[in-house]
Image (cartoon, rainbow, N blue to C red):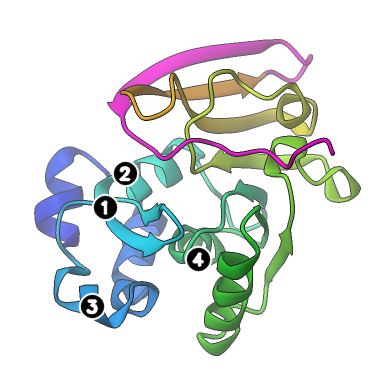
Amino acid sequence: MVREQIESRGITNAAVLAAMHQVPRHEFVSERWIDAAYEDHPLPIGYGQTISQPYIVALMTELLQPTRGAKVLEVGTGSGYQTAILAEVSAEVYSIEILEPLAHEAAERLRRLGYGRVHLKQGDGYLGWPEHAPFDAIIVTAGADHIPPPLVDQLKPGGRLVIPVGDAHEEQVLTLVQKSADGNVTTRNVASVLFVPLTRESAG
């Protein structure tokens, strides 16, 4: 998987490649999909959600330019696969999942696999996790129609945010947001992607 799907498409970050080798992707899919766990496409994980294509996981992680001492926020825990990859390449991961069943399943799975550095909560990821901000890097694993201002606010100067931006259920643009040391924010379009939409908790 790593050589044919990831390295061949230009992913070169050694820590990211090592993480993609290390994390057992088949542990993050249902028994029904185990035979397809390492194939080059997303897979359903229930509740209308998916585990992303391996290459996209690697690309988004590399765009964060993760370091061993980094504190990373993930919006959209899902099955916990991207969470585990982040845990392999950084110091601390804070991950938020809005769907309660997925949040519980991911927490149990990550515990079982030994990812003790991961902090999980069920909630509205659009709002980030202000109690633990600022973050060196933020990754959003669902498509949003705009870049959430709370996430930009919680990004440390010099930090990076990676998020798919576009209409729900249509092709989106994987966007890299960078905050300079003086707080100036710039964006760069990276690739066309298709993610499930970012959902919010109702106000009522």
Of mark 2 and mark 3, the one earlier in the sequence is 3
Of mark 4 and mark 1, the one earlier in the sequence is 1
The three-letter code of the residue at mark 2 reads: Ile
Tag 3 secondary structure: helix
Q: Is residue 102 left or right of residue 29?
A: right
Q: Is residue 21 left or right of residue 96?
A: left
Of mark 1 and mark 2, the one earlier in the sequence is 1
The three-letter code of the residue at mark 1 reads: Pro
Of mark 2 and mark 4, the one earlier in the sequence is 2
Q: Is residue 151 left or right of residue 194?
A: right
Q: Are marks 2 and 4 in contact (CB under 8 Å)?
A: no
Mark 1, Cα crowd under 10 Å, few <14 / some 14-19 / many 20+, is some
Magenta-drawn stretch, dominant element (helix, strand or loop): loop
Residue at mark 2 to residue at mark 4: CA–CA distance: 15 Å
Number of callouts: 4
Residue at mark 1 to residue at mark 3: CA–CA distance: 14 Å
Mark 4, Cα crowd under 10 Å, few <14 / some 14-19 / many 20+, is many
The three-letter code of the residue at mark 4 reads: Gly
Tag 1 secondary structure: loop
Residue topped by disc 4: 80
Using the image, determine if residue 92 lies above or below residue 128. Answer: below
Provide the residue span drawn in magenta. Answer: 180-204
Which mark identifies residue 56? 2
